[in-house]
Image (tube, rainbow, N blue to C red):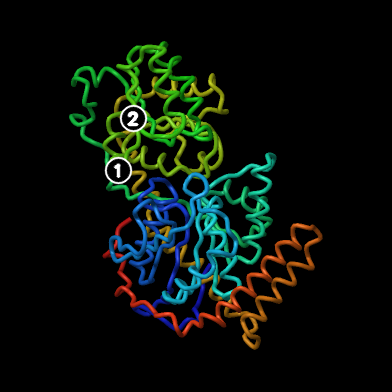
């Protein structure tokens, strides 16, 4: 897909340049896959000559405007936190401050992240009223049967009814999102996550020794590493159930578990019940920069998650030279080649135990089995590649917007889209969505009337230049 130009008129080294707002509830200092994705993608987009700001909710004392590496500006807005670090879904109350930021930063493209992020979805809805181009990235899989899924899917369908383009991190995620949000597949692209391979280099044999083991014991035993948030959907219950079985069948197996969550207490109780204090080490929550130091202490990485759209931690583990064990759920089978993984056919205790046992046998028979994993991962994933593909999506939505009839005022054009959506929908929910969108237009009208944009100071931009291929690395 080749896009020829952009109507914005700003270029850096001859290439189009955009002012981009990454909006999500999930960002630093909280660790996680979405947080890493937003940070690294923003950094690489800045290397490509774009101006990027991140908008998220405040984290305790971290409020206001902060600057991160390379001049990445972050707005920590004091929104009310609702559940698991997501802001309260207020629909209209966040519009005034978001509009203020969009005008201050002269935003061209709003890029929301995460279907669980209230602020990200609301920003996309408000962008329609302001006639700002939008892109949304879905990082998760969601169900269809329970009440929470039904309500979440209805909200997603409303929020993305007028989105410019959608990005999913795997083909499984794309299928899931198109069904949940009722989006045509042609309006959805697949762009995977990535890792900085040099930050996850395997350690020399002399360093791959756990702190509480001797050199001889380390080469004789096998350590299984688990790094995960300890929640039910991440397979924490399954992990608690299979550890005693695996430890009983093989006395040379040890577990190193990093992560925190409501299921942490269950792991502690399991360890006490089966007297596995010397074989199961619980290190709790760790920072992302500590992930490698934990991974290189093991030979196998176990990922018991019940659902996963991509699983960046699997790529990190393989880059560190670990054999990955997981179930064939979500987009996980798309992440790594078959020789780097051992899959269980289902997320049941017997199937997972069999998969771990098979991985133990592989590593025991050949200690150098994973020796080339790092070099292979280095050629497969690159954040610069992710950024360039995302940039192509920005070109696409910009070119599509340029093709629209410019003879009409933006507000009238937006209202026509709203009315079209209203008449095409035969459900009560669709009419409610259209009503919300019309109200949003009136809110925007009154904001423009009582707080005109010429009274809002325009922020000075951090100097950017588009780096060449020889200046950037994956």
Q: Is residue 400 visible?
A: no
Q: Name the residue under label 1.
A: 200
- Residue 318 placement: quadrant: top left
Q: Which label belongs to residue 231?
A: none
Quick one: SS at disc 2? loop
- Residue in view at x 23 percent, y 30 percent: 208
The reply to whether dot 1 and dot 2 touch (C-beta < 8 Å) is: no
- Residue in view at x 36 percent, y 42 percent: 316
Q: Which label belongs to residue 369?
A: 2
Q: Upstream in the sequence, badge 1 or badge 2?
A: 1
Residue 193 position, x and y percent, is 44, 51
- Residue 56 placement: quadrant: bottom left
Q: Which of 422 and 3 is in front in this view?
A: 422
Report the Cα–Cα distance between label 1 and label 2: 18 Å
Residue 386 position, x and y percent, is 43, 58
Task: Please state if 461 lies on the left or on the right of 94 as rendered.
Answer: left
- Residue in view at x 56 percent, y 77 percent: 447
Task: Please state if 472 lies on the left or on the right of 446 as rendered.
Answer: left
- Residue 157 placement: quadrant: bottom right
Q: Nearer the viewer, residue 304 or 146?
A: 146
Quick one: SS at disc 1? helix
Residue 200 position, x and y percent, is 30, 43
């Amino acid at each position: 897909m080749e896009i020829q130009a952009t109507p914005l008129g700003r270029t850096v080294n001859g290439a189009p340049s955009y002012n981009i707002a990454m909006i999500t509830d999930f960002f630093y200092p909280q660790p996680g896959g979405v947080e890493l994705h937003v940070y690294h993608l923003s950094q690489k987009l800045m290397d490509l000559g774009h101006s990027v700001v991140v908008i998220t909710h405040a984290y305790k004392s971290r409020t206001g405007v902060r600057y991160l590496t390379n001049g990445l500006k972050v707005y920590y807005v004091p929104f009310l936190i609702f559940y698991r670090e997501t802001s309260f879904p207020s629909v209209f109350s966040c519009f005034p401050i978001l509009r203020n930021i969009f005008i201050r930063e002269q935003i061209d493209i709003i890029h929301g992240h995460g279907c669980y992020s209230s602020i990200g979805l609301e920003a996309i809805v408000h962008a329609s009223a302001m006639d700002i181009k939008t892109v949304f990235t879905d990082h998760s899989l969601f169900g269809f049967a329970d009440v929470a899924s039904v309500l979440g899917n209805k909200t997603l369908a409303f929020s993305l009814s007028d989105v410019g383009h959608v990005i999913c991190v795997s083909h499984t995620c794309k299928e899931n999102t198109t069904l949940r949000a009722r989006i045509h597949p042609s309006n959805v692209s697949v762009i995977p996550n990535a890792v900085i391979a040099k930050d996850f280099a395997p350690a020399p044999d002399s360093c791959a020794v756990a702190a509480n083991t001797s050199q001889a014991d380390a080469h004789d035993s096998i350590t299984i590493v688990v790094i995960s948030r300890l929640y039910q959907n991440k397979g924490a219950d399954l992990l608690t159930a299979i550890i005693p079985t695996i430890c009983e069948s093989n006395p040379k197996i040890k577990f190193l578990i990093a992560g925190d969550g409501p299921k942490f207490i269950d792991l502690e109780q399991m360890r006490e019940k089966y007297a596995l204090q010397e074989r199961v080490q619980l290190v709790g929550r760790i920072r992302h920069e500590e992930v490698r130091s934990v991974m290189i202490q093991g030979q196998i990485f176990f990922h018991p998650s019940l659902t996963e759209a991509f699983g960046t931690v699997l790529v990190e583990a393989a880059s560190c030279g670990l054999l990955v064990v997981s179930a064939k759920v979500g987009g996980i089978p798309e992440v790594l080649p078959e020789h780097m993984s051992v899959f269980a056919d289902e997320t049941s205790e017997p199937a997972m135990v069999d998969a771990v046992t098979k991985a133990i046998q592989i590593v025991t028979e050949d200690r150098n089995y994973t020796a080339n994993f790092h070099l292979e991962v280095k050629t497969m994933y690159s954040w610069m590649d992710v950024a360039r593909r995302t940039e192509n999506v920005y070109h696409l939505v910009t070119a599509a917007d340029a093709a629209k009839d410019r003879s009409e005022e933006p507000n009238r054009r937006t209202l026509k889209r709203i009315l079209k959506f209203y008449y095409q929908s035969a459900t009560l929910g669709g009419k409610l969505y259209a009503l919300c969108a019309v109200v949003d237009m009136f809110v925007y009208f009154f904001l423009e009337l009582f707080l005109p944009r010429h009274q809002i100071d325009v922020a000075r931009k951090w100097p950017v230049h588009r780096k060449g291929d020889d200046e950037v690395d994956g």
